[in-house]
Image: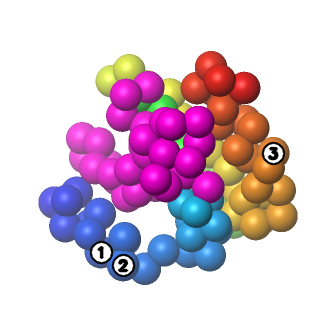
Amino acid sequence: MPDHIARKLRKAPTDAEIHLWWALRDRRLRGYKFRRQHPVGPYVADFACTREKLIVEVHGGQHAANEHDAERTEWLESQGWRVLRFWNNDVLTNIEGVVETILAALGGG
């Protein structure tokens, strides 16, 4: 089921996802390979660097104080993943800061 959802999500990205994908795709971020809308267990990560087990999520206001996000993060972390979350507005207005934070999490910042 996550594969089907991932394909659907890849066809309808948000503006923030498009913006961040431009910075992450084609190993543009110091050679790290990211996948977009990548299935991880029962979930679909917005972006995932599988080699480093880092997930990057981009969210709008609907995710504020979202209990499901906390459960999702707990499960992903129990599987050895690290999760970074950014607000759409941060990605759209401060892509440099977002990229710096991702690089720091990858150990290359």
Q: How is the image coloured?
A: rainbow
Label 3 and label 1: CA atoms lie apart by 29 Å
Q: Is residue 75 left or right of residue 86?
A: left
Position in image of residue 47 (x %, y %): 46, 50
Mark 3 or mark 2, earlier in chain:
2
> Disc 3 residue type?
Gly
Quote the CA–CA distance across marks 2 and 1.
5 Å
Residue 44 in magenta stretch: yes
Q: How many marks?
A: 3
Q: Nearer the viewer, residue 105 or 68?
A: 105
Amino acid type of disc 2?
Answer: Lys
Whether the residues at callouts 2 and 1 have beta carbons within 8 Å, the answer is: yes
Q: Which residue is mark 3?
A: 97
Q: Earlier in the sequence, mark 3 or mark 1?
A: 1
- Label 1 sits on a secondary structure element that is helix
Please tell me which residue is depicted at 72% across the width and 26% down the height of the picture.
109
Q: Which mark is residue 11?
A: 2
For the N terminus, the quadrant is bottom left
Residue stretch rendered in magenta on the structure = 23-52
- Indicate which disc residue 8 carries: 1
Q: Nearer the viewer, residue 73 or 22?
A: 22
**Residue 39 locus on image (x, y percent):** 28, 50
Query: Badge 3 local density, few (<14 within 10 Å), some, or many (20+)?
Result: few
- In the image, is residue 24 part of the stretch drawn in magenta? yes
Q: Does residue 69 lie above or below 107 as drawn?
A: below
Position of residue 68 relative to residue 102, above or below, is below
